Amino acid sequence: MHRRHLMELMAGSLLPLTVTAQGVRRRALAFPDDFGSHPDTQTEWWYATGWLAPVTTSERPADPTHGFQLTFFRTRTEVAADHPSAFAAKQLVFAHAALTDLAERRQHHDQRIARTGFGRAGSAIGDTHMNLGDWTLRRRGDATASRYDATIASPALGGTLALAMQTTQPLLLQGDAGYSRKGPRPAQASHYYSQPQLAVTATLTPNGQPARTLRGTAWLDHEWSDSVLDRDAVGWDWIGINLADGSALTAFRLRRADGSALWAGGSWRTPGGAARAFGSAEVQFTPQRVWASPATGGRYPVQWLVETPAGRWTVRALLDAQELDSRGSTGTVYWEGLSELLDTQGTRVGLGYLEMTGYVGRLVL
């Protein structure tokens, strides 16, 4: 759906999508309620990424053959919540999906947008249940033993991908007990938790071909906020990495136009250990190699040196061409792709996703 269709969804109001500068009210997170939607906040997303490989009987994990990304976004518009018309676009749901095929050296991706209601799109309160047409993401089970099921069917992705993602570790509350600063001003913050080290079973059914069963590991983020990006921030760089030993690494920085860091953060957790949150001055991203997109001209560092209090690593894309043009939904272009984490000896110690925004124009939320 193109940008003009977004305006049509506003049901004639032509009110822009804006965010306030108040920030979210800091509070303790409670589950299962906080698995669900927070329609009183401006912006929210559920974001699942992971790697997949063929099922084998070997004790040695198979090398990844695919990476996947599925993101559902919910946005509150400026249409009043008590507007009497059922057609008024009070809430919008966007979705992005991507499948990286390492054998083909190609990324497939698709995007959707709709207003909530009429069975077309929904964002449930009280637990995770997102739908946009026949794309779905739903959580089941006890709050300490979540299972997430997702289905993505799209000719642009080359078929249908069904995911079953089971928790193997406790929730990871990011920042200070789930309150994550995103800039120098106190209002620039979100509520944010992660589900690292999800055990994944996937069924991939290419168009016109038999279904294939794949397994791997995934990461799920859920974040919601009312805040705006600092006026000096053009975008961010972010990693969420599942390490082979069961550890989980998050690191991010918000970036100025000159490439310097405006704000940074992240976390580290070993299996069975407590999370260690990083302060803004404790995280450093140094670009190592740049890939230029022939489609948009964006220049993305696809290899980074990332330094944190928990260690020093190289993050390297497994495929350079993992740029997503989402100007038909959320209105931005970004890079999001399967990447590996290397230790100081150059040994792969983890797999996960690298996200880079603001390299083709300033990111606007």
Image (spheres, rainbow, N blue to C red):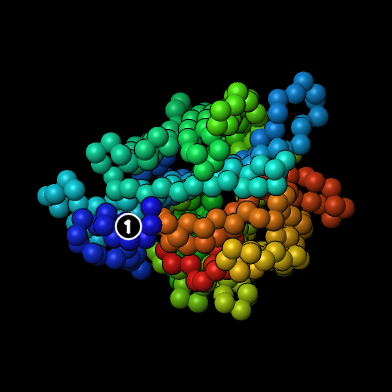
Q: Is residue 200 visible?
A: yes
Q: Is residue 264 visible?
A: no
Residue at image point 59% right, 26% down: 209
Answer with left or right where residue 213 lies relative to residue 19. right
Mark 1 falls on what kind of element?
Answer: helix
Q: Residue at x 51, y 43 (%)?
A: 156
Q: Nearer the viewer, residue 89 or 204?
A: 204
- Front residue of this view, candidates 104 and 298: 104
Give residue 176's position: percent from left, percent from top.
52, 54
In this rendering, the answer to whether 225 lies above or below 254 is above
User: Relative to 151, does residue 321 appear above or below in the rendering?
Assistant: below
Question: On the image, which quarter does residue 299 sit in?
Answer: bottom right
Q: Which residue position is annotated with label 1?
A: 6
- Residue furthest out toward the front: 208
Give how far across and how far down residue 286 sits, in percent. 72, 67
Three-letter residue code for mark 1: Leu
Does 19 sit left or right of 81 as displayed? right
In the figure, residue 336 lies in which quadrant? Answer: bottom right
- Residue 343, horizontal then vertical, whole percent: 81, 52
Q: Residue at x 20, y 52 (%)?
A: 88
Instruction: Name the residue at the top extreme.
Output: 57
Above-or-below relation of 321 to 242: below
Nearer to the camera, 71 or 247: 71
